[in-house]
Image: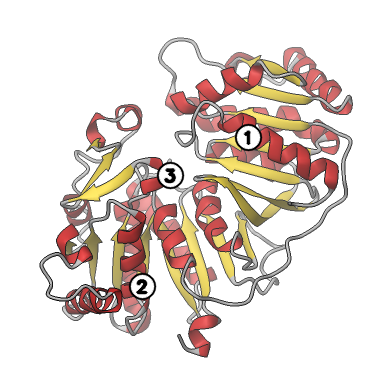
Amino acid sequence: MTAADSARRWLILADDLTGAADCAIAFGRRGLDAAVTWGEAAGIADRDLAVLAYDADSRGLSGDAAAARHAALLARWFAPDRVLFKKIDSTLRGQPAAETAATLAVLAARTGSAFGICAPAFPATGRTTLEGRVRVDGRPLEAAEVWRRDHTYASADLRAILAGAGIRSETVSLATVRGTGRGGDLATDLVADLAAELARIAATGPAVAVCDAETEADLDRIAAAGLSLAPAPFFIGSAGLAHALAALPTAPAMQPPSHAPSRFGSLIVVGSLAAASRAAARRLAGRDGVTHLPVDPGTLLVDGPARAAFAGRVAAILEAGGDALVEITTAGEPDMALGPRLARGLAEALDPVACRIGAVAATGGETAAALLARFGVDGIRLVDEIEPGVSLGLTLGRLAVPVATKAGAFGDADSLIRIRERLRAARLEGRFS
């Protein structure tokens, strides 16, 4: 590892806030100065961050619009001294193919060639890749709840998905990743062999290598082999690959930030429709010190007395030091098109409450981004990972409080209980332990 390697800097470009955070925290929990931001990011641009994660907020866009936004953001944020991590959803929601095509085009225009290493597996949450196809808990992604509720492509075949966006790709099989059948078994030799295979694919022109992975050890080999290449490739994946990359030797650790202790309670918002988040809300609602506040779409979509009364109840709970669990309710089959409007309506309703928040947690990237932006937050300095897919940090901007973000489909029934406990300790003690 050279001196240049130890000072490696990263740009993470994601399609939603929780994804940006759960990748950046892989580096932040190892002591690197890592932050996630969005919008104009005026308060972030001047910070010399080792890891900058940007929420492109492109998951709900069309393929063409998502590609154009990524191209514009790369023009603004990508620098030659940064390694690019293109974060995609581990279950392929949004427009990962169009965004990857835009990334290849931008990098090829700058350097004459471009090569991406795609490994979307996140074994800690049951997401794996086999024969170039995404699987959830050992079953095809197409059979999972998240696919039935929200998907863009006809199948979870990564090569077919990329080909649909005009991207040439090759699959790197699990046997190749693991060096199965090789004579020796030294880890360094296995990484060298994998690197040679990746280099072969890269040498044929702009392309993406789709890597199978079922375990964290598989991702570790992919990360090590990819970072050994010159010129550096860009990486396409979820937090599983980000953790593998962050685990490699890097710069000295930074001290975690401190903040003023607060007597106000925590605001915990469940905006995701995922079953995991709804189950966690039901479990947390039964805890002492937690007041459950279900709110229906009609209340949030109309700026009237009902919305003001709802905000008043939240403010009173937080002022008394209690924790407010706000859950957006739905009746029957949810209207997915209402998601952005509900997130904005909730953010507008709770804006007057911001000064009484001691800490905040949100499930679902769209909900988290809308809330924090409305509260005058333009970034999050990431500190730790409470559990896979759940990032802990300190808000930057007008509000400086502990914050936790969670992808809606991640976690189990006790995830919100664990999040609440970490937030309570951080806000009362004024530090992250």
Distance (Cα) linking label 2 and label 3: 29 Å
Q: What residue type is labelled 1?
A: Arg
Dot 3 falls on a residue whose secondary structure is: loop
**Residue 103 in sight in this render:** no
Q: Please state if 384 lies on the left or on the right of 248 as rendered.
A: right
Q: Position of residue 284 (x, y in %)?
A: 63, 22
Foreground of the two, 372 or 429: 429
Q: Gap in Å between the C-alphas at discs 1 and 3?
A: 28 Å
* Mark sitting on residue 224: 2
Q: Could you classify mark 1 by the number of other residues whose Cα lies within 10 Å: few (under 14), some (14-19), or many (20 or more)?
A: some
Q: Name the residue under label 3.
A: 59
The residue wearing badge 1 is: 418
Q: Residues within 10 Å of mark 2 (few under 14, many from 20)?
A: some
Residue 332 shows in the view? yes
The label shown at residue 281 is none
Whether 214 is drawn above or below 74: the answer is: above
- Dot in front, 1 or 3: 1
Please indicate whether residue 345 sits to the left or right of residue 353 in the image.
left
Coordinates of residue 248 in the picture (x, y in percent): 46, 71
Amino acid carrying mark 2 in the image? Ala
